[in-house]
Amino acid sequence: MDEDTGEMLEYRHLIKRPKYRDTWSKAFGKEIGRLAQGQKGVVEGTNALFFIPLSDVPMDRKRNITYARICANYREEKKDPNRIRITLGGNLISYPGDVGTRTADMLTVKLLLNSVISTPNAKFMSLDISNFYLMAPMTRYEYVRMNLDDFPDEIIEEYKLNEIADKNGCVIAECRKCVYGLPQSGILANKYLEKRLNEYGYHQSNYTNGLWTHESRPIQFALAVDDFGIKYINETDVEHLKAALTGIDPETGKPMFEITEDRKGERFVGLHMDWDYETRQVHVSIPGYVGAALTRFQHPTPTKPQNQPYPHNPKKYGQKAQYVEPMDESPLLDKNDKRFVQEVTGTFLFYARAVDATMLTALSSLASEQCSPTERTMEKVKQFLDYAASQEDAVITYRASDMVLAIHSDASYLSEPKARSRAGGHYFCSEDVPDPNDNGALHTEAGIIKAVMSSAAEAEMGGLFINAKKAVPIRRTLEELGHKQPPTPIQTDNSTACGVINNEIQPKATKAMDMRFYWLKDREAQKQFRIYWRQGKLNRGDYVTKHHPPVHHQTIRPSILTPWKVVEALRTKLNKITGAVINSTARVC
């Protein structure tokens, strides 16, 4: 990103600008050296790529030669922040085998964080494998064509690329190990790592992707590609895992993997964690994410704070009937504006799922409009960006608990266009009590029910069905983490739905409602769930089932998110103990 204009620049733009040319051409040369046979005095090679003449490519593979995409990123937290990564065009690769890779998702990571803070004497750290993909060999080589004009002179000279370049000024590289972008890279690298870890007694769960445990040691970790998020109690267990990763490879005589570690466990899969082991709490945030996104979309801070992420349909007091919002008949957006809407939605969806649930309902509605966005959709997107710019960076806090999954389920009837209803759910870890105490959200369900519901009770039943289905694999993951689960308490504020499921009311239901009814009854009979009623104002799932006026968002946001000043106070406290200085890039409004 251009620091002056906020314009997003790719490598081809950077090398044409004198201000950036030298820095980024050196970064590209370093990446080529890392992938190939090294660059003298700069980096050691991994032998993933070998430059060859076009005539050396097998005849039956020439039609599968792919292209390279050069990705330039500035990663402030890295030792060398100016990073070039070369990814290959996987869309032109015709790989005959399986390419699906098992990796931990955000929900598994959050369950692990809760398990750490709720297990006596447990701590968290992270590990990262350097050049993870580039260590896994391939038996079926792939081929990539690269433009010689992109290479710095020192690399052209060192590898004698002019001698093998074709008449179009391109060179061919043979991929003998996994490289970013190849569809098979993920599964081959994962299996290569899995074979090594199995030898040391570590095994991946058969049910929860990316969750690993040891046969006898009390150590568990979530694996997201090449990042390890580790829950441990004993230092000896950490050293055992590190030995498994860095042990000498008998074939090469070198360490199997090179690793970097974060003993404080402050960063993992894009999340920043502030651990308070004394009070058994962890504060999770993504400082700087919103600010960077606003700069990317060149969106200024509004002159007047916006406390509503999406417009609501105001109630007409005094009227017996409330009417739906009129259909949007404003002109459709052009191709560039449509892409802008989609990019905003996708960029902020990760942030909302990770830490800021107050954005989810708005993003859900925007996502439902992004296929055919209109000028009115763009107005809503601008309002959403104003909201993002007006709020301080979100922080979600998890406290120690008995690790019993609990859910608040709710639904809003006919609250979306085309007679659709919304389902909402608040998932958290608590205690095995009749009415579980609240905790930070593991997951927030905020979706539009696809089918048209015939009544409020059917919508509530649909919400219970959606939330209960989501809970089934979460219960399994919690048990794999060592936390036995009683029947999961699910709170609803609809007495009819609760009464139907608990045999207090005899329903006359549609077939769709009948299916949900019996599914919920069967699961409750299996003691997987305990569905109970509490009044609506106590239901945390209600907030994400509809769009609210600004004053309601201002009232509810502090109960969902932790003020940034709490994190700053914890850091100040830890600084006094350790003498360290922790810099923050958070936005505090």
Image (cartoon, rainbow, N blue to C red):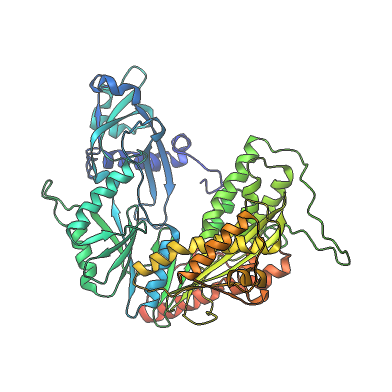
- The residue lying at 27 percent from left, 42 percent from top is 34
- The residue lying at 40 percent from left, 58 percent from top is 77
Using the image as rendered, state which of residue 307 and residue 531 is in the foreground.
Answer: 531
Name the spot of residue 339 as percent of width and height, x first. 60, 40
Residue 5 makes an appearance in the image: no
Using the image as rendered, state which of residue 449 and residue 513 is in the foreground.
Answer: 513
> What is the total number of numbered labels drawn onto the structure image?
0
In the rendered image, the vertical position of residue 493 relative to residue 367, given as above or below: below
Please identify the quarter of the rendering in which residue 125 is found.
bottom left
Q: For the view shown, which residue lies furthest in the right direction?
A: 318
Q: In this image, 441 relative to 117: left or right? A: right
In the rendered image, the vertical position of residue 129 relative to residue 91, given as above or below: below
Name the spot of residue 52 as percent of width and height, x first. 24, 26
Residue 551 makes an appearance in the image: yes
Q: Quadrant of the C terminus?
A: bottom right
Name the spot of residue 373 as percent of width and height, x first. 68, 42
Q: In this image, 266 relative to 317: left or right? A: left
Name the spot of residue 124 as percent of width and height, x first. 34, 70
